[in-house]
């Protein structure tokens, strides 16, 4: 069952409309595909938010006050008509009634607008809650994937960083751990690229400097050096000079350092 077929089957799965074979294949697919499982959880969170949404109903006090004001307005209109008719019989007797009616309409419009405003505020709060829950689900999936035995899964987990605009300590710590300790070069390189999103963070800068002192792979070394130049981190000068002095440092890495070192000093 591919991802496209899975997404199309989510409503039927949640409503229990899949047959036994489809249901079994669906759930087996969830076990093997964290991204699809995440998609399902987001659907569930959205449905839960709609189910828990409460319809705002005016309190009895508000209703009673409105009916009282309406009754007073009706009585006032009757009195105006009676006085104008008895005293003048003028064609201008419509003016006070028109003003009264306009005031009543304005009152109703104000009440309606207030209700719409509060409903809009509540809807915005619900959307914000759903978005927050979705990010929490993605964070859990991201951290889980980064601990997977498969290097490709770990890379997939690292790349989830694109969904996060704000620095999250748990996520950054997990990314730093992959950059410093992962046995796979591609995972470490992907972690460097992911952390570059927060290159101005002192925590991330410190992690880059540490990695520059321990990393042996040339491609990862160059990626870190480029980030240090980007952030103009002067603390990176010392480990870069040590790399120049070490015999096992690749010539093209030394060339890179010689080209950019003056930009930091």
Image (cartoon, rainbow, N blue to C red):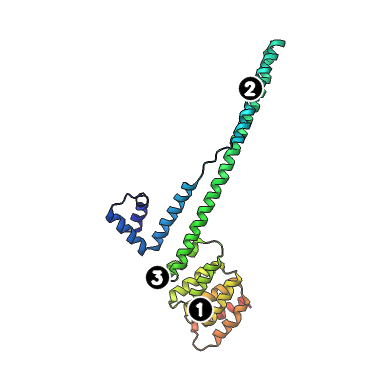
Question: For the residues marked 1 and 3, what is the alpha-carbon distance in whole angstroms?
Answer: 21 Å
Q: Give the residue at mark 1.
A: 221
Q: Are marks 1 and 3 in contact (CB under 8 Å)?
A: no
Q: Earlier in the sequence, mark 1 or mark 3?
A: 3
Q: Residue furthest right?
A: 87
Q: Residues within 10 Å of mark 1 (few under 14, many from 20)?
A: many
Q: Residues within 10 Å of mark 2 (few under 14, many from 20)?
A: some
Q: Are marks 2 and 3 in contact (CB under 8 Å)?
A: no
Residue positioned 40% across, 70% down in the render = 152
Q: Earlier in the sequence, mark 1 or mark 2?
A: 2
Q: Earlier in the sequence, mark 2 or mark 3?
A: 2
- Residue 88, visible in the rendered structure: no
Q: Give the residue at mark 3.
A: 152
Q: Give the residue at mark 2.
A: 74
Q: Nearer the viewer, residue 193 or 265?
A: 193
Q: Residue furthest left?
A: 21
Q: Residue furthest bottom?
A: 247
Q: In this rendering, is residue 170 above or below 253?
A: above
Q: In this rendering, is residue 132 above or below 215?
A: above
Q: Nearer the viewer, residue 62 or 187?
A: 62
Question: For the residues marked 2 and 3, what is the alpha-carbon distance in whole angstroms?
Answer: 75 Å
Q: In this rendering, is residue 51 above or below 139?
A: above
Residue 15 picture location, percent across and down = 36, 49
Residue positioned 72% across, 11% down in the render = 87
Residue positioned 58% across, 45% down in the render = 121
Question: For the residues marked 1 and 2, what is the alpha-carbon distance in whole angstroms?
Answer: 83 Å
- Residue 2, visible in the rendered structure: yes
Judging from the image, what secondary structure is the residue with disc 1 in? Answer: helix
Q: Which quadrant of the rendered structure holds the C terminus?
A: bottom right
């Amino acid at each position: 069952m591919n991802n496209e077929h899975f997404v199309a089957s989510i409503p039927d799965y949640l409503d229990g409309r899949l047959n036994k074979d489809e249901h079994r294949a669906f759930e087996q697919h969830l076990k093997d595909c964290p991204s699809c499982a995440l998609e399902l959880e987001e659907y569930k969170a959205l449905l839960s938010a709609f189910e828990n949404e409460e319809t705002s109903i005016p309190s009895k006090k508000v209703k009673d006050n409105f009916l009282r004001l309406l009754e007073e307005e009706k009585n006032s209109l009757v009195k105006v008509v009676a006085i104008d008719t008895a005293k003048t019989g003028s064609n201008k007797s419509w003016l006070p009634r028109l003003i009264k009616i306009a005031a009543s309409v304005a009152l109703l419009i104000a009440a309606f607008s207030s209700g719409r405003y509060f409903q809009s505020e509540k809807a915005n709060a619900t959307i914000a809650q759903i978005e927050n829950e979705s990010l929490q689900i993605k964070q859990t999936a991201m951290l889980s994937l980064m601990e997977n035995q498969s290097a490709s899964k770990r890379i997939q987990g690292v790349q989830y960083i694109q969904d996060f605009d704000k620095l999250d300590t748990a996520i950054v710590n997990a990314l730093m751990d992959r950059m410093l300790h992962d046995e796979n070069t591609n995972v470490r390189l992907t972690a460097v690229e992911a952390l570059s999103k927060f290159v101005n963070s002192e925590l991330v800068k410190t992690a880059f400097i540490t990695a520059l002192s321990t990393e042996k792979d040339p491609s990862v070394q160059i990626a870190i050096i480029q980030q240090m130049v980007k952030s103009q981190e002067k603390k990176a000068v010392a480990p870069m000079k040590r790399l120049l002095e070490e015999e096992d440092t690749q010539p093209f890495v030394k060339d890179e350092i010689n080209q950019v070192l003056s930009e930091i000093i």
